Amino acid sequence: MNAWLLALAIGLCGGAAVWLILARDLLRVVVGLALAGTAVNLFVLMAGRVGSGVPAIMADAETVLAATAANPLPQALVLTAIVIGFAFVCFALVLLMALLAKRPEGDVDRLADAESGAGPDGKPQPFYAERRA
Amino acid sequence: MSGALANLALAPVLVPLTGAVGCVLLAGRPRLAEGFSLLAGLVSLLMALLVLQAVGEHGRLALILGNWAWPFGIEFVVDRLSAGMIAVSALIALVCLVFQAARVDPADRRSAALPLVHGLMAGVGGAFATGDLFNLYVWFEVMLIAALGLLVHRGRVAALDGTLRYLVLNMVGTLVLLTGIAVVYGATGQLNFAALAQAPASPLLAAGVALLTVAFLAKAAAFPVFSWMPAAYHVLPAPVLALFAGLLSKVGVYALLRLFGQVFPAAMAHWQAVLGAVAVATMLAGALGAAWHWDLRRILAFHIVSQIGYLILAVALATPAGYAAAIFYTIHHIIVKANLFLIAALVCRVAGSYDLRRIGGVAAARPLLAIIFAVPALSLVGIPPLSGFWAKFLVLRESFAGGHWVWGGAALVTGVLTLYSMSKIWIEAFWKPHPAPVAVGRLPLAALASVALLAAITAGIGLFPQTLLGFAGQAAAGLVEVTR
């Protein structure tokens, strides 16, 4: 039952994330990336098999973990992935704010500062620094 | 391999991390920070050579952190392939740091980027040294966050836009990688490379390998997901650009080589045709993109893409000789590509622009620079007796020997297209008179020395290829043999 709920959550998060990442609005793209990270984190947790609620702790006399204990490794992996993902979302949000300050419309399709594309003659336009010179 | 010597496997991470921390602590005193950074770069190279020597003697260095019993715990394994990549990346990092210190571009005066450069090198070193799939993901992320910091460093709107493209495509690639790792772990219960190599095949594992392959191809800037690279690279300061061009996408190729050469060799049966097709498309797309552009940096960035195609082709040949060709090609390519971007910065300094339509006359103004450019440029095209000739010769011989006529043919066509855009650079920037001559000062000696050193290495590999050929052969043999 738990696994099915988790699978449903992964599917919903993942689907919403793809929809948001493909949007033209910059903020939606960033939120989509955060949501995609969440979906993948849940997926990593699920890959380690969910279901057991027995803590992965050995008593003093024991040398082998009980077979019914939960798998601790995916939790360590997910924790790492969450921290890394959090850093990237923070970076993306700061980048978003810096970009919006200069390009307030925040439209992905109209961002052409890094790549100027072809001019009217079909040849590549000079890069921004060259145009300014 | 155990004992104190095995601790050397951590050096590729620890030395650059020390450099990064030191540069942060010395941020208030820029000259001291710069000196410390150069020192860290030098120590990094010396340690890398020490690792190379130790690996040459013992075959491999393996260290499990926390002294867990294998296959538990995170393992650092440095074999010949890793040691070679670590050594060449440390060399490029040092040359780029020297070039940065020479201040070819006046905008390089701020040294706030130094901790990020060392952070990037820690990520690169970790990715080459680790023997654990999840740990590889972590190092990819260390590299990515440092690369993003370097991209936005100057904060112009074009840099922000380029960073956004880089960020979104690389984050999607990373998430695919993480999903692939989860599937592989779910299928086998292992994350250690050597343990994964012994895991039984299953449909679930094949799905995981597919996800990993897609992710590594995206990280290597292969067709059709290469657009993040030429979209972002030209906003970088020259020394950092050379570092990115030399190393970042090659880590993706290294991961691909590790994946198919050592960890999942059986999966190659399903992937060979796909990798070959991707390689052909990548080679041609990169060479055609380069042919259209007029900005020096963008031409060279598209050339990276086409060269990545050759590397993937060599991996797709799936024979020890093919892997050896891939290793030889990667090492040659890192040196040549970083050098070309550094020379481009010097050309811009002499002629005043990166746009080929606005510059010219460099050969008359700076004959020495023209000669230094000719070495890596002709090497990239594959003219004997330079290193690129041997690299291409190995790939072509192996693909024709394996009966892959289409792949080899596409590689030859790409070579002609590469020659076309290299001639374009040569004619426009070096031969044609300058449309509006500008007065320039002297080129910094340290910058000239660094490009001359890389050009000399390129020529040296070309004239005496046997050393590197032997090393690549041993590295490929060490890759395919089952270890542990």
Image (spheres, coloured by chain):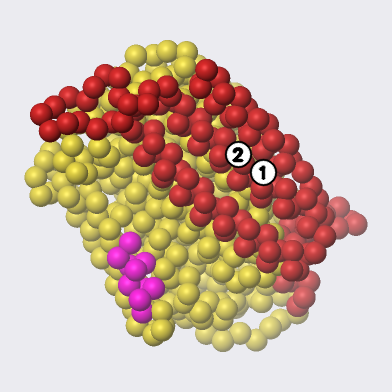
Magenta residue check for B61? no
- The answer to whether mark 1 and mark 2 are in CB contact below 8 A is yes
Tag 2 residue? A36
Q: Residue at x 86, y 53 (%)?
A: A122
Q: Colour of chain A?
A: red
Q: Residues within 10 Å of mark 1 (few under 14, many from 20)?
A: many
The kind of residue tagged 1 is Gly
Q: Secondary structure at mark 1?
A: helix
Task: Read off the chain for label 1.
Answer: A
Residue B171, above or below B441: above
Distance between the alpha carbons at the discs numbered 1 and 2: 6 Å
Q: Does A78 sit above or below residue B432?
A: above
Q: Which mark is residue A32?
A: 1
Q: From the top left corner, tell me how far across and down residue B74 is, in percent.
A: 27, 39
**Residue B25 as seen in the image, left or right of residue B207:** left
Q: Which residues are magenta?
A: B17-26
Which chain shows up in yellow? Answer: B
Task: Determine whether the residue tagged by mark 2 lies in a helix, strand or loop.
Answer: helix
Q: Nearer the viewer, residue A86 or B34?
A: A86
Residue that sits furthest to the right in the current view: A120
Q: Residue at x 57, y 46 (%)?
A: B170
